[in-house]
Amino acid sequence: MVDLFDRHRLVTLVGPGGAGKTRLANTIGWQLTPSGGVWFVPLAPVGADDVPRAVLDVLRAQDTGGPYKSVVDRLVEVLAAADLTLVLDNCEHVIDAAAALAATLLARCPRLRILATSREPLRTDGEALHPVPPLELPDPDSTAEEARATAAVRLFHDRAAAVSPDFSLEAGALTAVVEICRRLDGLPLAIELAAARLRTLPVEAVAARLDDRFRLLTGGSRTALPRHRTLSAAVAWSWDLLNAEERDLLERLSVIPGTFTEDAAEAIGGPGDLAELVDKSLLHPAEPSDPAEPRYRVLETIREYGLARLAQRGEVEAVRRSHAAYYLDLAETADPHLRTSDQLPWLVRLSAERDNLSAAIRWAAESGDSEMAVRLGVALSWFWFMRDHPPESLDLLGRILQVPGADDPLVVAAHALATTEVVNRQEEADAAFDRIREALSRATPGVHPVLEMARLALAVSSGPDRAAPAARPTDPWSRSLALLVEGVLTMNDGRAAEAAPLLKRAMAGFEELGERWGMATALSTLNAALLRSGDPQGAPVERATRYFRELGMPEHSMENEVAAALRGDEDGGRRHLTHLLDQAGSAESRAQVRLGLARLEWRAGRLDAARAHALTGLADTPPDRSTPHLVALLLAVLAQVDAAEGRPDEAVRRLDHPAVRLTLTWHTPVAAALAVAAAAIELGRAQPRRAARLLGAATALRGWDDMETITRQAVDALGAAGFASAHAAGAALSRAEALELVSKVIT
């Protein structure tokens, strides 16, 4: 920062109120002292006409007296040959006078340097701006150590320890401090005022009361300027410097909880100059979702103040309706684009608008506007599906359904489909699938792809014979989706060879449209169908991986990559899976890779390594998302390890788990994997004939890849003929009979 004076004679520290500009200016002043005198001029109590006099008063020790035409002339006389730095602090309320004086003095005093602090630039020639942003905040996924190291948390801890010496950043206290620092936007003044409250309140109470921050954060230092003694005074100082149009715009923009574009600002706030609000540090540039479309944000503290002002005018509800209407239009515009070749920018845009879309739904639900609430739910349901039903989607869809008159079958189906992602118990799953069945019975087939995905989920859980009738496609994308769904159901019914042509046709349709989700999903499913039908080459899943990554859905490609690694040689597969583990960005992805490593080590006979990977995989399964298939498959590997080590009863106890009971009934390969685990248990009990029959049952349940080790052991115990007889008996069972046989062993 100091090196700016090597190239510029006027440097302005610019930032919002309470960001620490004055403190930084003092620090810089001390660093500049060796290169000449530093004179600090506080302009906060000064009017515009008195700015030159305030500077002269500070320099009075160098005033030699004598006549002069004006105060400015006298300043020039004093400073003409001086090698010093003037610090003009708090220029924002006298910005024109401060700028004029700075320009005059710099032009007439060649060795003078000026350091100014202001909430907006002076806008004079030669000015260099140095932004003073809020303090560094912890990232959402920061570790405790990383959070403690951030500037905002360190400042809070330092100030808190001064008023409460026993305060420490441990456990719940650290969580509360992180919340306080985030909600106060990392502003040093606000953080210091919050820390001072620890004289009388526990830190958790301070965090809980931030909705009333302007009454909470008072009682600053008695030696501070009046506007630095309370948070409300600090914000009011900035507000009073705005003209009426700027205040009106900022108050209307305060209803926007997330970042926003210029179009959104105009639709919600009305016409106005956003650049002026940015210059005055009341609006902040945000990271754009599109480089050609800048985004902005209002700090939460400024938002709270603006909302209070808007409420005094009785305009909050009207502006919130404008906000909801704008984002409804955006969602409905984006939805059909998500099923076209230009889906990527729309996915990015909707992701950037997450907070605003959520707020729009909450407002529609709270105000009882059922039409708007349903339209928002319908428009966003496919986006949420492509984002694997983020946690807020379940809550928001539930809010919509609580609005009288909002019992729309598509919203019901979307809510039930999202529910299946967070349930772990059979009764919860049954209730969700019952709601899907009821919604499909009321919905118009083919209206929306979420209905088709709900039908697929119902078929996977209950079997194709209990699924709702197929939709009647009305457009090329929907026709391709119908073929994809039919292909999945056919493959899950054990007819992989028949599924492949359906999936190829689906792939061709999606390719013609250039739609990545459809191409990636069709390729992944086609690959599984070809492998199950005996084609060792499979499908080019590398393309599917690329499409999923472009869509921001890497978890969906991980299963393909793990399967490819398991088909290769042992050492190469281990290297590839270890590399994938380093790349895995989510808990679910890590659990998938750990499952692959556990299966690979089980095949290799390395039981300790298989156990370690499976246990780590279970620990990695995301706590906020239902992944019963992953949990069941990891438990199946652990059960096989237990049985191989001579502990079959421990293996049975291992499989006494809700995820196992839930997925055993699904029409997926998980049931077959559990049948193989049951066979391993029977081998561990010295019952090879029962094991062979269970391996046959696994075939009846659509087969599983990891059957070689158990099959070899059963053949060794029974002989080829004995094994073939018992296996055939198991393979001849119906699905219900096969599930009953497996259940008798593991439950």
Image (cartoon, rainbow, N blue to C red):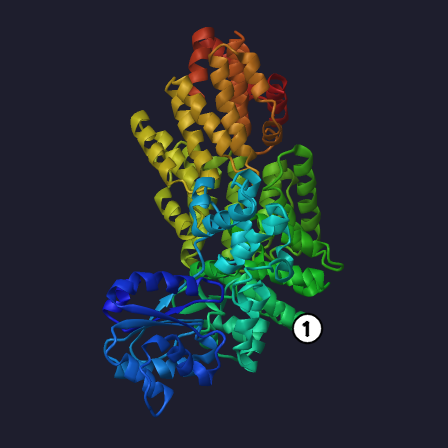
| Residue nearest the observer in this picture, 621 or 741 | 621
The location of residue 278, given as percent across then percent down, is 45, 72
- Which x, y percent locates residue 423? 62, 38
Q: Is residue 29 left or right of residue 427?
A: left
Q: Residue furthest front?
A: 65
Q: Residue extending furthest bottom? A: 69
Is any part of residue 550 visible from this angle? yes
- In the rendered view, would you say 241 is above or below 196? below
**Which image quarter is the C terminus in?**
top right
Counting the numbered discs, the total is 1
Residue 682 higher or lower than 277, as above or below: above
The residue identified by callout 1 is 312
Instruction: Tell which of 227 and 543 is nearer to you.
Output: 227
SS state under label 1: helix
Crowd rating for badge 1 (residues with CA inside 10 Å; few <14, some 14–19, many 20+)? few
Vertical side of 64 occupied by 402: above or below: above
Q: Which quadrant of the view contains residue 233?
A: bottom right
Examine the image and state in which quarter residue 739 appears: top right
Q: Is residue 727 visible?
A: no
Q: Position of residue 487 (x, y in %)?
A: 50, 43
Residue in the foreground of this view, choosing between 442 and 401 = 401
Q: Quadrant of residue 611?
A: top left
Residues 60 and 649: in front is: 60
What's the amino acid at mark 1?
Answer: Gln
State which quarter of the image contains the N terminus. bottom left
Q: Would you place residue 695 above or below residue 257 in this image?
A: above
Outermost right residue: 404
Residue 337 % position (x, y)? 49, 62
